[in-house]
Image (spheres, rainbow, N blue to C red):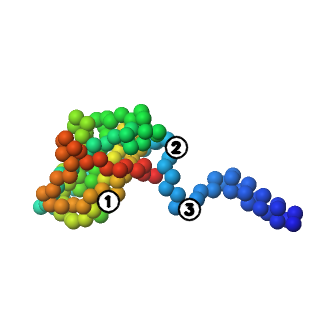
């Protein structure tokens, strides 16, 4: 009996010391502050621009995460990029608080977005935000598209 208690106690202690993590945990970080450098996203000059669409995107982490990002500030150094099947198909910096994103099509598929916050020095993602559709427009100046951003680990 003493051996079993010792083994259980030892296992619990090892888990606490090792920082056991629940598998598949999607827990958000306690703080959005990170140390990531600005990404160098770009669209290849050789990319097929035979089809395209536009997205007008707003980012407001303070509204989406009021407990963690109440101090959120959008900066001219922030950037949003669009990806289709892992290929960068559009990049935009904010103009008057909005991202006017030209998305080069070439390949049909779901568009995933990445946002880099220079304030938090962290990336946020919105996987499968919308589906690419030639000549389509997502969002307007008056009613921009508001992706649901999740911190990228």
* Residue 73, image x, y percentages: 36, 34
Disc 3 residue crowd, few under 14, some 14–19, many 20+, Cα 10 Å: few
Disc 2 residue crowd, few under 14, some 14–19, many 20+, Cα 10 Å: few
Please report whichever mark, 1 or 3, sits nearer to the chain's N-terminal start. Answer: 3
Please report whichever mark, 3 or 2, sits nearer to the chain's N-terminal start. Answer: 3
> Which residue is painted at 21% across and 65% down in the image?
107
Residue in the foreground of this view, choosing between 45 and 35: 35
* Residue 10, image x, y percentages: 77, 58
> Which residue is painted at 82% across and 65% down in the image?
4
- Specify whether 52 is left or right of 148: left
- Residue behind mark 3: 23
The answer to whether the residue labelled 2 contacts the one labelled 1, judged by CB atoms less than 8 Å apart, is no
Residue 128 badge: 1
Asked if one can make out residue 83 in the rendered structure from this viewpoint, the answer is no
Asked if one can make out residue 136 in the rendered structure from this viewpoint, the answer is yes
Q: CA distance from mark 1 to mark 3?
A: 23 Å
* Residue 142, image x, y percentages: 19, 41
Task: Label 3: state its secondary structure.
Answer: loop
Q: CA distance from mark 2 to mark 1?
A: 25 Å
Task: Label 1: state its secondary structure.
Answer: strand
Residue 30 badge: 2
Query: In the orientation shown, which residue stands out farthest toward the right?
Result: 2
> Which residue is painted at 22% across and 37% down in the image?
95
Task: Label 2: state its secondary structure.
Answer: loop
* Residue 115, image x, y percentages: 33, 47
Please report whichever mark, 2 or 1, sits nearer to the chain's N-terminal start. Answer: 2
Find residue 64 and report its image quarter.
top left
**Quarter in which the N terminus is drawn:** bottom right
Callout count? 3
């Amino acid at each position: 009996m003493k051996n079993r208690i010792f083994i259980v106690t030892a296992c619990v202690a090892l888990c606490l010391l090792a920082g056991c993590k629940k598998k598949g945990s999607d827990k958000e970080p306690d703080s959005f502050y990170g140390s990531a450098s600005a990404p160098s996203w770009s669209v290849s000059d050789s990319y097929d621009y035979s089809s395209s669409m536009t997205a007008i995107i707003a980012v407001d982490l303070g509204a989406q995460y009021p407990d963690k990002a109440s101090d959120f500030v959008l900066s001219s150094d922030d950037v949003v990029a669009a990806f289709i099947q892992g290929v960068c198909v559009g990049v935009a910096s904010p103009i008057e608080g909005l991202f006017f994103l030209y998305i080069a099509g070439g390949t049909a598929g779901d568009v995933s977005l990445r946002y880099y916050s220079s304030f938090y020095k962290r990336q946020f993602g919105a996987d499968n935000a919308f589906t690419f559709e030639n000549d389509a427009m997502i969002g307007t100046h008056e009613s921009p598209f508001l992706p649901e951003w999740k911190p990228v680990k």
